Amino acid sequence: MATNEERSRWIVHGERLIYDNRWIRLGLVDVAIPDGERFEHHAVHLDRAAIAVVVDEQNRVLMMWRHRFLFDRWGWELPGGLVDAGEDAITTAAREVEEETVYRPKEIEPLITYQPMAGMVDSEHSLFLVRGADLVGSPTGEIEADLIEWVPMAEIPAMIARGDIWTSGTLIGLFAARDRLSATSG
């Protein structure tokens, strides 16, 4: 007898690439749903991303105030970026913290990995908890943020309620870090 998983599993018969560049790959996937209906479904493939929640000894989070042109919206975000070919996500997270904030992580550990839009987009996001960071210089090169600040964890809920924190990686990272830190401190 088939399990519920087996009865509701979609079958992939192949994928046809429609568009491909450094940033995005768009495909049409030939799928069959459990009742046997077969059709093409869009699939968006993006590179993996790594994001870091950097927390200091005073229970503050290192955050960046950034503008996102697609939405013409400002918000506080965590440092992070795309995982380069041949690089592991933890290395990317550490590199991005230093490149974007000029702080070098002291201790870094895996926090959580998730897919932000699992129905049609493949874009694995790995989040890491960084405990402590040393200032190693002043920003040079591309400007990633208008402000870089240490924000008290206690202020995070009000910032979310105001809409100052609104991106998925930042929200998930902050909630996961809060839970991890409270579990290890209690």
Image (cartoon, grey):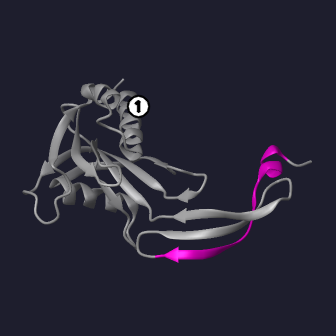
What is the x, y in percent for residue 70? 35, 54
Vertical arrangement, residue 26 with respect to residue 173, above or below: below
| Number of numbered callouts drawn | 1
In front of the other: 66 or 132: 66
In this picture, residue 24 sits left or right of residue 59: right
Q: Quadrant of residue 85?
A: bottom left
What is the x, y in percent for residue 183? 40, 29
Q: Quadrant of residue 140?
A: bottom left
Vertical arrangement, residue 80 with respect to residue 168, above or below: below
Magenta segment boundaries in residue numbering = 3-20
Vertical arrangement, residue 31 with respect to residue 22, above or below: above
- The local secondary structure at tag 1 comes to helix
In this picture, residue 49 sits left or right of residue 34: left
Q: Quadrant of residue 165?
A: top left
Category of crowding for the residue at label 1, using alpha-carbon neighbours closer than 10 angstroms: few (below 14), some (14–19), many (at least 20)? few
Vertical arrangement, residue 174 with respect to residue 92, above or below: above
| Residue found at x 15% / y 55% | 102
| Residue found at x 75% / y 57% | 10
Give, as a three-letter code, the residue at label 1.
Asp
| Residue found at x 57% / y 51% | 118
Quarter in which the C terminus is drawn: top left
Location of mark 1 (residue)? 179
What is the x, y in percent for residue 185? 33, 27
Name the residue at the front extreme.
72
Name the residue at the right extreme.
1
What is the x, y in percent for residue 29? 67, 67
| Residue found at x 83% / y 59% | 37
Does the magenta run of residues contain 183?
Answer: no
In front of the other: 41 or 135: 41
In this picture, residue 15 sits left or right of residue 114: right
